[in-house]
Image: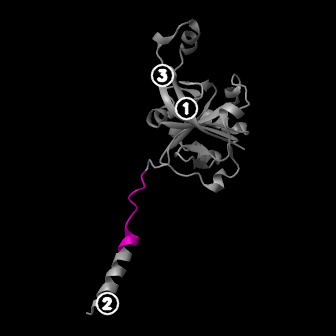
Amino acid sequence: MNKALIILLSVATLGMMTQCTPKQNQTKDQPMDISKESHADFTPFDVQKDFSDNGFTFFTKNLILCVGDSSESNAMTIGWGGIGNYLGHERAAVTVYVAPARYTYEFMEKHKRFTIMEFDDPAIWQYMGKYSGRDGDKAAALGLHVAYTEHGTPYYEEAKMVIECETMTAWHQTEKDFRNNTPKEWYDGFEAGIHTVYIGEVIGAWRR
């Protein structure tokens, strides 16, 4: 076999090996880019400058909390929450509350980022608040399409507004933390347990 033929076969073999070698730098935790198609109708905004909702009534809209990553996620309706600042005037923050009996609680403890979303259709928050993700895929049942931020945080394409947060701290309340009778009376007989408080730094916000 002449030298030229040996070189040609070597090059061809190397090319085949290159095509068959799996990508080693892709991991489950690697952030996923938001597809242009899914995010085309959203416009990013600065929550500290352009958030126009009343903070005292914003959470009465029955927002949806979604947490997870590209491998798993779950969502639930939330009727409580807070917006403002934490650990700095320029650090916008969102506070959410999740009871330990909720399926979403497991995800909040496992994953470090979450989104809160607003929808026009009341059927979405009604269903999300009535059924548990332990019993089935609620997003699929509602026909919602999961997309991901550049950090890999899940949200639904059908939302009218999405706020992405990274959890900074969690406070697992106990009865010893109660300072007046309001929480004592409210949690009396509440089977889901005392809510854990999660404070997340806002790292992205979009709206239609």
The residue to which callout 3 is attached is: 171
Say the numbered circle drawn on residue 201.
1
Task: Report how far apart the C-alphas of labels 3 and 1 lie in the structure.
Answer: 15 Å
C-alpha separation, residue under disc 2 versus residue under disc 3: 70 Å
- The percent position of residue 186, horizontal first and vertical second, equals 58, 14
**Side of 52 where 168 appears, left or right:** left
Q: Main secondary structure of the magenta part?
A: loop
Q: Earlier in the sequence, mark 3 or mark 1?
A: 3
- Residue at left offset 48%, top offset 36%: 112
**Residue 140's disc number:** none
Q: Which callout, 2 or 3, points at the residue further toward the start of the chain?
A: 2
Residues 182 and 96: in front is 96
The quarter of the image holding the C terminus is: top right
Q: Is residue 27 above or below residue 62?
A: below
Numbered disc 2: secondary structure: helix
Amino acid under disc 3: Trp
Q: Residue furthest left?
A: 1
Note whether 194 is above or below 11 in the view shown: above
Q: Residues within 10 Å of mark 3 (few under 14, many from 20)?
A: few
Residue type at mark 2?
Leu
Tell me if I can see residue 81 in this picture: no
The percent coordinates of residue 188 (x first, y second) are: 54, 13
Q: Element at badge 1?
A: strand
Range drawn in magenta: 17-27
Nearer-the-camera pick, 15 or 135: 15
Q: Which residue is mark 2?
A: 5
Q: CA distance from mark 2 to mark 1?
A: 62 Å
